[in-house]
Amino acid sequence: MKYRVAEYYPQFACKCGECRASCCSGWPVTIRKDEYDRIMEAPASPEYREELKAALRLNFAPEDARYAHIVHGKSGHCLLQREDGLCGLQLALGEAVLPDVCRLYPRNRRLVGGGAECALSMSCEGVVELLLSSREPLRLIETELGEEPLFSIDMTEEQKTRCRRALELISDRTMTIPERFSRMGEELFDCVSVCGETEGRLEGVRMLHKLTQDQSGKNKVAGVLCSHALACFGLERKDKLSQVEAEELLRRYDEAGAAVWGRWPDWTAFADRLLANHMFYNSFPHVGGTSDGARAFEGLCAVYAFVKFVTVGNLLHREGREPLADVLGELGRMIEHSDFKYRAAQAYRRQSEYAPGYWRQLTGL
């Protein structure tokens, strides 16, 4: 079956035991009832059967679609993951017994308006490394894949056209990234910037502080990164910023950003590849089937600015491609596989009297 995929898709392969941040650790994973039954009914030794019972726990009030979850040990790793990083379940019982989420991650195979697509999540370290390995705009190609789509997304032809146009705009390197957001907002979502430059930047940095503070120490995925970013800017114990504190944060962030991006002169090329991949994975602006394109757009603005903010705070005193990939991959876990992108849009709207009028300044931070 022909699938529409990102151009790097044929090069992707699981890093298995070589992964620095395995997908088997650090976040909740649920499985369906049929998957749970398949695992428990597979032939296994009595000893391994006990390991399976300890590693797969029924949810409270289990439903067929969310019947059980994978238990993590004190280290945060799946109890079935071996010390060498490999999957003990796959090695013991074969790949066919694996839950879909384990077998297919980070792939998102779907039918969109009659056409098959398979996107890869930037929550995977290997995906981020492939995205960073090229400086060319992300292209979509067609390739043959043997398996059927897992689910279907209903989308009108008009919605599909808007998805394609949004990808074209974010990849248009005749404009700066803030200019691309500006064009996208005005052309596709009737979002017009009405806030002054100074007010917009201060409101934007206040919102970034709020988003980061909300996740700091509270979210098992990326919470530590958020705490590190706030500490870097000297604001780890601040819940709300005064005018003077917002101005100081903006100054520190501008200085830190200049230092970090100075080491990555091709950051803009990486950024639009990451953005395009995120948008393709989520069928932007049809994120989660929403009909509120403006909200999806505001969420995208907030996600982009948030990723830059936390990345700068974590890379100011660290250099190299691996730390960059590690930070982006962990942020990707939180963004792609939680409701953060929706809550970011809500925070954007609630932040001040200017919302959503300061989105242009937000994307330029």
Image (spheres, rainbow, N blue to C red):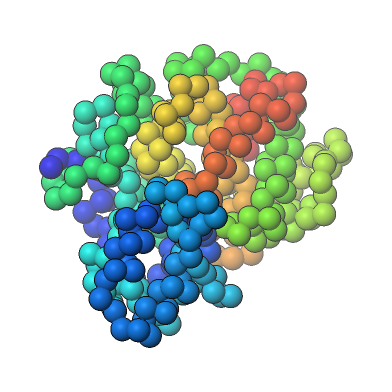
Task: Residue 80 in the image: state x and y as whole percent.
Answer: 41, 75
Figure quadrant of the C terminus: top right
Q: From this view, report whether residue 303 is shown above or below residue 265.
A: above
The residue positioned 44% from the left and 48% from the top of the image is 63
Residue nearer the viewer, 295 or 232: 295
Q: Which quadrant of the structure image shows residue 16?
A: bottom left
Task: Residue 232 in the image: state x and y as whole percent.
Answer: 72, 58
Q: From this view, report whether residue 221 is shown above or below residue 94.
A: above
Q: Is residue 363 left or right of residue 105?
A: right
Residue 24 visible in the snapshot: yes
The residue positioned 66% from the left and 50% from the top of the image is 215
Figure quadrant of the N terminus: top left
The residue positioned 80% from the left and 39% from the top of the image is 247
Task: Residue 356 in the image: state x and y as whole percent.
Answer: 64, 22
Q: Is residue 200 left or right of residue 286?
A: right
Residue nearer the viewer, 239 or 26: 26
Q: How many marks?
A: 0
